[in-house]
Amino acid sequence: MKILLTTMKLDIGGAETHVTELARELKRRGHSVTVASSGGVYAAELERDGIPHHTVPMASHNPAQMLRAYFMLRKIAKRERPDIVHAHARIPAFLCGFLPRKRLGFHFVTTAHGAFRATGLLRLLSNWGERTASVSDDLTDYLSKYYGIAPQDVIPTVNGIDTDKFTPRDGVNGQGATIMHVSRLDPETALAARLLIELAPELARVHSGLKILIIGGGGAEAELRDLALAANERCGREVVSMTGARTDIAELLQTADLFVGVSRAALEALSCGVPTLLAGAQGFLGLFTPETEAQAVATNLTCRGNALPTAEALRAALEAALDLSGEPRERLASFGRDFVLRGYSVARMGDDAERLYTFENSRVSPRVSRVVMSGYFGYGNAGDEAILQAVHSAIESCASERVKLEITVLSRSPQATREMYGFTAVSRFNVLRVVRVLRRGDILVFGGGSLLQDQTSTRSLLYYVNIIRLAKLLGARVILYANGIGPVTRPANRRRVARVVSRADVITLRDGVSARELRDMGVKNELIVTSDPVFATRPPDVTQRAASYLPSSPYVAVSIRESRENPDFPARVARLCDRIAAEQHREILLVPMQHPADLAVSREVARLMTQPCSVLETRLSPSQLMEVFARADFAVAMRLHALIFSARAGTPAYGIDYDPKVAAYLDLLHLPCLGTPATLDPEQPLEPPSDELRAKLAEAVRQQAELAAATAKLLGKLIADGERWSDNV
C-alpha cells in the first residue's frame, strides 16, 4: 500500500517515536510510506532511512496556519495518491478529515495516543476517521464515552519497540548511579523533570556520584535549565545534565541505572532492562513490577487516573529503587525486558497497523458503505416512522457480497428509534454526533416526506438545507429519496432550496407537483418522479386474528389532524361521522396518526358525536396502524399517510384536502375528496366505495409500488457506483 502518516511534529515524545518506528516497520514490510509533520529531530532520521518527509505546519492552533496546512496536505494527497492516510494527533486528524477522500480514493484512519478535553470547540476538532486504533484500554473507553465509538470498532495496538535496538547493556557502569528521564519538556508535561531537579541536591548527598540525565526539548526547557544550573550549584558539581532533544536514546539508556518516566520512553527503558519508575504529568504509579503491571498496561504506562507525583513520594520511590542490587535487580531487569518482548514489539505494532488498514480494504472482504438517513424521524408521526422503516429496508436490500452497509438514522429520539426498530441512531440535534456520522458517511439518504418546506417554519427548512450542505462539504453523495417539495413561499427560502437541491447526486420525488415546484425554483437537474416509500411495504395479512384494540363490529377508520384556522372543524367532522355511523351502520374508530397532536382533536370529535365511536388511544407502530386501515370498511383520511396506509392495505378512503400533497395523491389513487378543512360539508352525499373504485385503487397502488421499488434501485446503483472508488484502493 501507499501510506501517508501524519503527526504534529517529530521531536521527543511517545506519539512521535511511535510514528517513526511505525514508518520504518511498514517500509520494511514493503509498503510505500511518506510522513508529514511540522518537523523535528526524527525527520532527518526518516529521510536517511529512505522515508520521505513533508514539513507541514500541523503543530499550531492558529487558524491561518491550519488552513495553510490543510492545503499543503491536500496537495500531497493529490500528488501521491495514498491508499491510506493515517493521522496520529488531534490537529492532523482534524485536517485530514476534511480532505476529499472519496474523490482522491483513500481511506482515513487514526490512532488515539491520549485523552483530551472533549468539550466545546475541541470536540469539533476531534476526528477519529473511518477506523481507529487505541494504544490502551482506558483510551478505548474514552472513545466510547465521549465520541460514541463502539469498543468493537476500535483496534487495539501498542507502542512498538525495536527490541533489537533497545537491548540490555553488557557489563556494569562505573561508579555512581545514573537516573535518566526522557520526555517532551512542555509546561504541561515536565512535572517529573521538575521534581527530579528539585530532589537532585538531597539525592546527591546520599548517593555519591549520582547523575541525573534529562533528555528532551520543549517550551519549558529554558526554565528547567535554569533550575538545573541552580541545583548543580547547590550540589557543588554537575548532577543534572540537560541534553536537549536527542535521537540516540537507545545508546543513552546503556548508561542508565534507573529510568523515571512514562509511556513509550518507559517501554524503551524496560526493553533495555533498566528498572523503571512510572511517574509523569498524568500520574504516579511507582516502580514497574509484576504487581503494578496490570494497572500500568491499562493506561499504556501513562499512569492516567493515578495521583500526581509529589517530591516526597518520588524521593521515597527513588531511594528504594536505587537500593536495589544483585539478584532482585536482575530479576526486575529481566521482567521488564520480557514484558516488552511479550507484547510491545515493533512487529506487533506493524501487524496492528496492517489490520487497521485492511479492515475495509481487502479485495476479498466486502466494501463497507456508510449510509446516513435524515428525515422527520423520532417525532411519533406514524407516516414518517413508516417512511423510516420502508427506506431503511430499501437501503438494506442494496447490500451484496461486495458491499456491506452500515446505516445510521438521525432521530429526535434516538433511544426510542433503537428500542422500537433496532436501528443505529444518533440525536439529530447533537451537532458533534451529526458532524461525525456525516464525516464518516458515504451517502446521505434524505427523506422521504415533505422536509423542504417553510409552512412549518423557516428554522425547520434551514435545518434540512444545512444537513445536505454539510454532507456535501464532507464528501458524501446525496440522494433525495422520494421527497415531497413545498410549500416554500418565501423567496429567500426558494433560492436556498434550489441551490441545495441542485447539489444532490440523485433527485427522486414522490409526485409530479413536487417536480413542477422545483422546476419553478430553477432547478435544472434531472428530476425523477417515483412514489412514496410506504408503497413498497407489504400489506398486512387480514386472514389472521384481529388485534384486541380493534372494534369487534364493522367500522370506518377516521384519521384527522388539528386545523387551527377552522375552529368549527371538529364539530363538522363529528356530524359527518354521525351520518356515516347512522347510514352505514358502522362504528367510527378515530385513529390518531401522530401522538399526542392528533389525539386531542380525535377526542374532541368523539366527545361531540352522538353515535357509537371509539378513539384508538394506544400509540401503534406503522405496521399495526396499517392493519387498522386494512380491516376497516373504508376510511376518511386527512393526513397523507393515513391515505397511503389505507390505500396500500387495499381500503378505499375519502380524503380531506388540507395540503397540496394530499390533493396530488387523491388524484393519483382515483379517490374522492370531501373538501378542505374550511369547506368540509358534513351533509354532502357519501356513498360506500364501489367495486369500480376498489379496482381503480388496486391498479393505482400496483403502479405506485413499482415506482417505489424503482427508487430503491436508483439508491442501489448509487451505492454500487462506490465500488469504482473501492477498486482504486
Image (tube, rainbow, N blue to C red):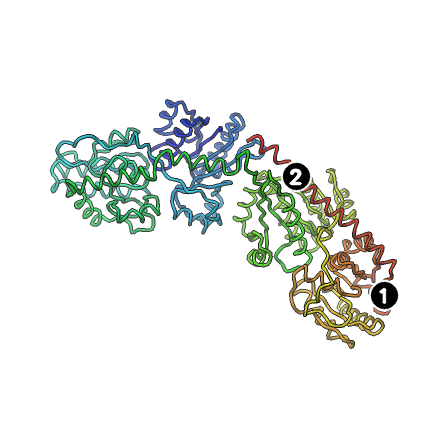
Q: Which residue is rendered at x = 11% and y = 38% of the image?
A: 208
Circle count? 2
Q: Which residue is rendered at x = 43% and y = 29% of the image?
A: 35
219 to the left or right of 406: left
Give coordinates of residue 534: x percent, y percent. Answer: 71, 53
Picture disc at residue 720: none
Foreground pick, 314 / 651 = 651
383 to the left or right of 66: right
Q: Which residue is rendered at x = 35% and y = 46% of the image?
A: 299
Vertical side of 624 occupied by 450: above or below: above
Give coordinates of residue 478: x percent, y percent. Answer: 64, 41
Label 1 crowd bin: few (<14), some (14–19), many (20+), radius 10 Å: few
Vertical side of 106 occupied by 139: above or below: below
Residue wearing tag 1: 688
Q: Quadrant of residue 338?
A: top left
Q: Quadrant of residue 660?
A: bottom right
Residue wearing tag 2: 718
Q: Are marks 1 and 2 in contact (CB under 8 Å)?
A: no
Nearer-N-terminus badge (1/2) = 1
Q: Looking at numbered disc 1 in the image, what kind of residue is underneath it?
A: Pro
Vertical side of 590 occupied by 65: above or below: above
- CA distance separating discs 1 and 2: 45 Å
Give coordinates of residue 581: x percent, y percent. Answer: 81, 72
